[in-house]
């Protein structure tokens, strides 16, 4: 009997480890994913903005962050003393933020749109969900200051994983040129989001999710240099001292809406919150375009003189 129990335990452990390996590959690498952020449909609410961006003459910036990792970005020069850095979502690229790019360019901003590591044209084997990328963004910030001078006023804005990255960045020791943050539908922690996706995407019961996610966390520490629980936006937001605007759709079933309230509560800096009633994940801007632009514009007028 004891031998059977031991064998069953070993088989279960092996199966869990194999499942964790697969889920790590699915969640933390660009494995088998195709991104085409440049496909534009006439039915897209942001069709005109994306068409404008596609035809705009863009500079190509390259940043070396590790010996074997170079990052890529597009830059739209508006000859301005204000710059926005736009951060895209999971398995997308900088060009997917074209709608926001047009919005900020019209307001007189230079626009930098980086491809996160392991996304788009940037190099890298593993996705950091904002935890690894936060230091990359700090280097992009310094690149903007070197390029445009000490008088730059910099805004960081991100959507989904980019929103989480924005919150991760907010807790760093940042140059004085960074004035404020805008995050749209970012999660509260990587572990909570991975757990939620395991339950929603593969419909695992909670009792099986816990060992699966723990296995992913161990694998991620070995290969990607952090345990999932380390990557907490809550922890970073508690260190933030700059104004931040939180935006989230009430019908978001990719990043549950409850997370925005957790992020908002964790923030002691000046803060604003807007939950759009009908928007699903990353749909607040196209669904509430005029109101979205007005609320963002009013927020910026307070903090970017």
Image (cartoon, rainbow, N blue to C red):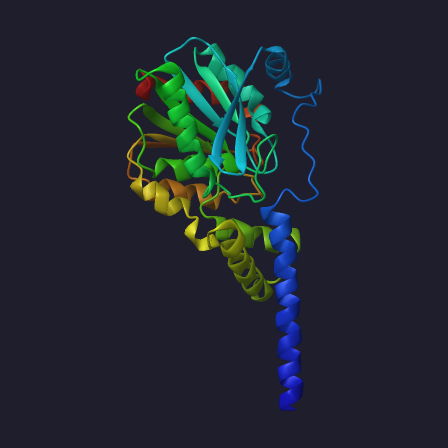
Q: Is residue 245 left or right of residue 279?
A: left
What residue is rendered at 45% in x and 48% in y?
A: 189
View extreme (bottom): residue: 1
View extreme (front): residue: 67
Classify 279 as above or below 58: below
Residue 2: image location, x then y, percent: 62, 90
What residue is rendered at 61% in x and 19% in y?
A: 46
Q: Is residue 274 visible?
A: no
Residue 62: image location, x then y, percent: 52, 25
Q: Quadrant of the N terminus?
A: bottom right
Q: Is residue 125 visible?
A: yes
What residue is rendered at 43% in x and 8% in y?
A: 79
Residue 239: image location, x then y, percent: 30, 41
Question: In the depicted view, which residue is nearer to us: 186 or 43?
Answer: 186
Tally of numbered discs: 0
Classify 32 as above or below 93: below
View extreme (top): residue: 79
Q: Is residue 209 left or right of residue 156?
A: right
Q: Is residue 273 left or right of residue 16?
A: left
Q: Quadrant of the C terminus?
A: top left
Classify 252 as above or below 289: below
Residue 199: image location, x then y, percent: 60, 55
Res 127 → quadrant: top right
Question: In the depicted view, which residue is nearer to us: 225 or 172?
Answer: 225
Res 121 → quadrant: top right
């Amino acid at each position: 009997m004891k031998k059977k129990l031991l064998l069953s335990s070993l088989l279960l452990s092996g199966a869990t480890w194999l499942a964790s390996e697969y889920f790590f590959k699915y969640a933390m690498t660009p494995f088998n994913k195709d991104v085409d952020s440049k496909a534009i449909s006439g039915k897209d609410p942001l069709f005109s903005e994306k068409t404008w961006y596609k035809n705009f003459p863009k500079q190509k910036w390259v940043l070396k962050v590790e010996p074997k990792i170079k990052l890529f970005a597009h830059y739209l020069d508006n000859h301005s003393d204000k710059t926005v850095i736009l951060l895209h979502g999971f398995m997308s690229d900088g060009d997917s933020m074209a709608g926001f790019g047009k919005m900020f360019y019209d307001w007189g901003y230079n626009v930098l749109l980086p491809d996160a590591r392991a996304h788009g044209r940037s190099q890298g084997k593993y996705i950091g969900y904002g935890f690894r990328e936060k230091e990359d963004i700090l280097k992009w910030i310094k690149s903007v200051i070197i390029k445009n001078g000490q008088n730059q006023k910099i805004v960081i804005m991100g959507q989904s994983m980019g929103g989480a990255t924005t919150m991760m960045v907010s807790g760093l020791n940042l140059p004085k040129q960074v004035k404020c943050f805008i995050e749209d539908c970012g999660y509260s922690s990587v572990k909570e989001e991975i757990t939620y996706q395991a339950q929603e995407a593969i419909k695992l019961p909670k009792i099986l999710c816990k060992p699966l996610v723990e296995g992913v966390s161990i694998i991620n520490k070995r290969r990607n240099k952090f345990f999932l629980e380390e990557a907490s936006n809550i922890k970073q937001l508690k260190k933030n001292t700059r104004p931040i605007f939180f935006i989230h759709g009430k019908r978001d079933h990719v990043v549950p809406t409850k997370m925005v309230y957790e992020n908002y509560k964790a923030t002691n800096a000046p803060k604003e919150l807007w939950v759009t009633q009908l928007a699903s994940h990353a749909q607040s801007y196209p669904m509430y375009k005029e109101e979205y632009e007005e609320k963002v514009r009013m927020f910026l007028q307070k903090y970017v003189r």
